[in-house]
Image (spheres, rainbow, N blue to C red):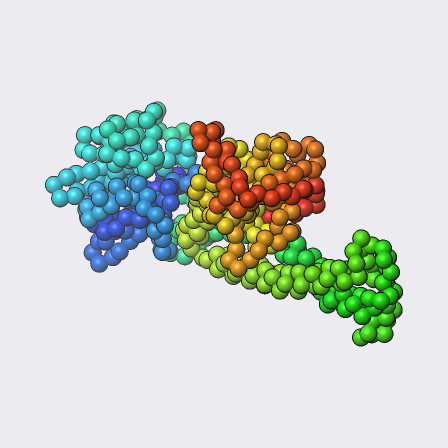
Amino acid sequence: MSLNWKEIDLALSELDLAGAQIQKVTQTAYDVICLHTYKEGRARSILVALTPGACRIHETFRAVPKSDKPLRFGEFLKSRVRNARIEEAVQLGTDRIVRFTLRHDDERLLLYVRLWTNAANVVVTDEAGLVLDAMRRSPKRGEISGGRYAPVDVAAQSPENKPKKEFEVRSLPGEGNFNERIDAWYAEFSGALSLEVLREQVRKNFAARYVRLQAALETLEEKRKEYADADAHKRRGELILANIAAVRPSSAWLDAVDYSSGEELRIRLDPRKSASANAEACFDQYRKAKHGLAEVEAEIAAEKAEIEALRGSEKILLDEENPLRLLKALRSMRVSAKTTAKKRPGLAFRRNGWLMLVGRGAEENDELLRRHVKGSDLWLHARDFPGAYVFVKARSGKTYPLDVMLDAGNLALFYSKGRNSGEGDLYYTQAKYLRRAKDGPKGLVLPTHEKNIRVKLDEARLRALEACKE
């Protein structure tokens, strides 16, 4: 609901701004500014919102937050109208255009607030109508620096030009004058800037983040189950050594009694290996599971802590009663997400605490290699097929687990021309062993110290990775 002309007149009459000084200007967002005025011992915050469906001007009784970064029009107003005195604040007839006549030292400026739902704007001109700047620059309307803007004061417009539709001041709930009631009503109910709409945006934003974290947590829980039986590998190795004389050459099984439980066990053997080699293989599985379990436990704890931190942040935002602060927080989150996406080309997947970056072509491959990876990061690329470079970001004190190698290998093959074959060989080495080909096309590298890994595309693994895409 935007204010109609009668409501604008009523709001202005209650404010009595003639003679007030503009002490401060705050631009909360691209379509919201606030003029902080002072007159006869009373400070007022005059909110101007150009939000579609909620265009308005009125006094606000809520704190008005500043933007995280300086906004162009707000900085212009600070330089030109701060400390100016308001000589007049009047609506031009029934056009929903408010004109502020400002005196700043020896300079007189005109600040127009046009509260049209589909063409709202704030324009500052000199006395002759030369545009100094506009909140929304519109060359077609001449609302740019150097343009002309001088709406006619139609306070005494002829009957045929007056609006045919009858407007009335709407009855709003609550106590206090019209400015107080309308400020409360807009905060609670009005469209894009209402608390309920903003809170719903908060819920949707956090719900998407919860889904990604929960998917990663479920994957880690499955991995923990695999590693939980580490001691069983150790027991099997010890039983093989204890019964080494009973192991026949090329035997695929060993029947033995578990020394701790008395249970009869049948242990599978690799018939191509000796008894001692089979035992060593069991001990290797034990060491990997033991080490992997501790790592997975730490990652599960980190994921749970991040989920709890998100819940805390969501609760703080949902408890916020000031829609302007909530709007600022939401826009900051969106800007942060866009900035992160712009900073890094290609795709990013974060799984089990490992970050994998995927360049989908020569431009992205080259940009990732030049600016976003370090020498110790791992590089993978499909052999004999053009396609993606996949980089796995190194973690301090960690080696690359086989599971991460398979994740990265699936991504490298999936985002290459070898995808249709379903399986293929890949090169892998550390980024410090990549050298750009002299005079070669962008993105072409010559690897050294490379090794080979063969990967078969795993649909379940790819689905799990898709859920972890950032």
Q: Nearer the viewer, residue 403 or 329?
A: 403
Q: Residue at x 34, y 51 (%)?
A: 66
Q: Residue at x 66, y 34 (%)?
A: 419
Q: Residue at x 27, y 35 (%)?
A: 133
Q: Nearer the viewer, residue 217 or 318?
A: 217
Q: How many tags in the picture?
A: 0
Q: Residue at x 53, y 41 (%)?
A: 448
- Residue 123 in percent (x, y) is at 29, 35
Instruction: Name which quarter of the figure residue 466 lies in.
Output: top right
Relative to 227, 182 lies left or right: left
Residue 246 to residue 51: above or below: below
- Residue 467 in percent (x, y) is at 62, 47
Residue 203 in sight: no
Residue 294 in sight: yes
- Residue 286 in percent (x, y) is at 70, 63
Residue 268 to residue 205: above or below: below
Instruction: Name which quarter of the figure residue 48 lies in.
Output: top left
Relative to 318, 420 lies left or right: right
Relative to 311, 108 lies left or right: left
- Residue extending farthest left: 106
- Residue 298 in percent (x, y) is at 59, 63
Q: Quadrant of the N terminus?
A: top left
